[in-house]
Amino acid sequence: MYGKNRLKLGFFGANCSSGKSVTTAPERWSGTWDDMLRLAVAADECGIDFLLPIGRWKGYGGSTDFQGSTYETLTWATGLLAATKRITVFGTVHAPLFHPVIAAKQIVTAHHVGQGRFGLNIVCGWNEGEFDMFGVEARDHEGVYAYGQEWIDAVRAIWQRDDFDFAGKYFDFKGVRVKPKPYGGNEPVIMNAGQSSEGRAFALRNCDALFTSTRFMTNLEKLRTETTDLKATARRYGREIDVFAVTFVCCRPTKNEAEAYVHYVMDECCDWGAIDGFIDLKGLRSKPADELATIRAGYPRGLLGYTAIGTPDDVAAQLAGAAEAGLDGIGLWMVNYGDELPYLRDNVLPRLEQLGLRAKA
């Protein structure tokens, strides 16, 4: 995250069983610690910039219980930081579930273990079904970000000060003293993926990077407008912000091989029970039967979002196009991160180097 790469690349969702692939294919990502550790070390060695986890507390069901086995992300990041040298590892924190004093100290611990390479991905709201596990009541949309603002203000105060009181609408602390402070006197890089107007305003006020929706990536001119507007708005807040997005990658020697594999994984082997879990979570069961059937049939492909599918030349060109449209970084996901990294490393990264988007690892 602090290197010279014009286009930063990372892996998104590797802390979860199945990653982001809603598939029953037996070669799907395991999400075990041994596999994640091997992935982190290999990614570090070939110059991948970051690992970004999903904050998940329960799976979506189906025959695979999609994302049903996950590691808590702050401790996960700390372990991976201890085993790597250059890569930035994020922790994804749901602000309503983590007390600011505890979170501030956990984050600083990871930051010191990584000698400044820890990043914070802050999530202000999300999944009511998960929040019910904690007895936490979901707030309305405006309240979500008001709480998030006070949460990050409290955490930053803890990182910067000692022996102080903090009184707000949601928190009331007295005699706060937390040491050590962030490594090297610098805060961790902070990221957010809010998509609503309130969420984006929160990110632009508080964060170093914003994950934008992949719906803008189907048209690179729209993406260019989106990234330009976001960066201009951030400057009005007195901030510079990087814009990131998520991309599904399937790279094979031929385009036909890549497309056939995606069809096999996402169509032939789709975990329809997990898809139904998504539909229930989104409250779509009340739709008319024909409309619901259409939504359900399209959901597996819809979850892919923006894709880079094809030969190494195809994938490099698709990633380069997104960079030319203003993206500073991309979180990649694949059916099996560990198995597919070597081909990406040997065939796509050199092409991005030749395009001037990345420095040689």
Image (cartoon, grey):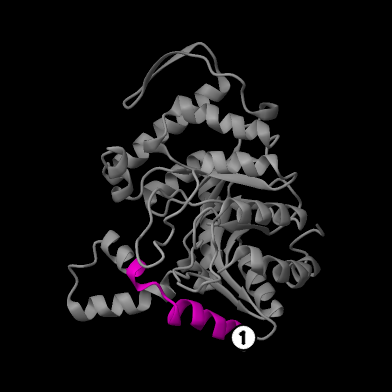
Residue in the image at 35% along x and 35% along y: 147
Picture layout, residue 203 above or below residue 21: above
Quadrant for the C terminus in the image:
bottom right
Q: Nearer the viewer, residue 124 or 89?
A: 89
Residue in the image at 55% along x and 86% along y: 260
Q: Nearer the viewer, residue 354 or 361?
A: 361
> Counting other residues with Cα less than 10 Å from the Cα at mark 1, is it few (<14), some (14-19), or many (20 or more)?
some
Picture layout, residue 237 above or below residue 312: above
Residue in the image at 65% along x and 75% along y: 315
Which picture quadrant has residue 257? bottom right
Q: Nearer the viewer, residue 258 or 209?
A: 258
Instruction: Using residue 116 as the reference point, say whether residue 202 is left or right of it.
Output: left
Instruction: Using residue 280 as the reference point, say whether residue 20 is left or right of it.
Output: right
What secondary structure is found at the residue carrying circle 1? helix
Q: Residue 355's x, y, as percent?
A: 77, 69
Per the image, is 43 magenta? no
Give the labeled residue for mark 1: 257
Q: Nearer the viewer, residue 184 or 63?
A: 63
Per the image, is 274 magenta? yes
Q: Residue 202's x, y, as percent?
A: 44, 42
Q: Which residues are magenta?
A: 258-275
Residue type at mark 1 is Glu
Q: Main secondary structure of the magenta part?
A: helix
Q: Residue furthest bottom?
A: 256
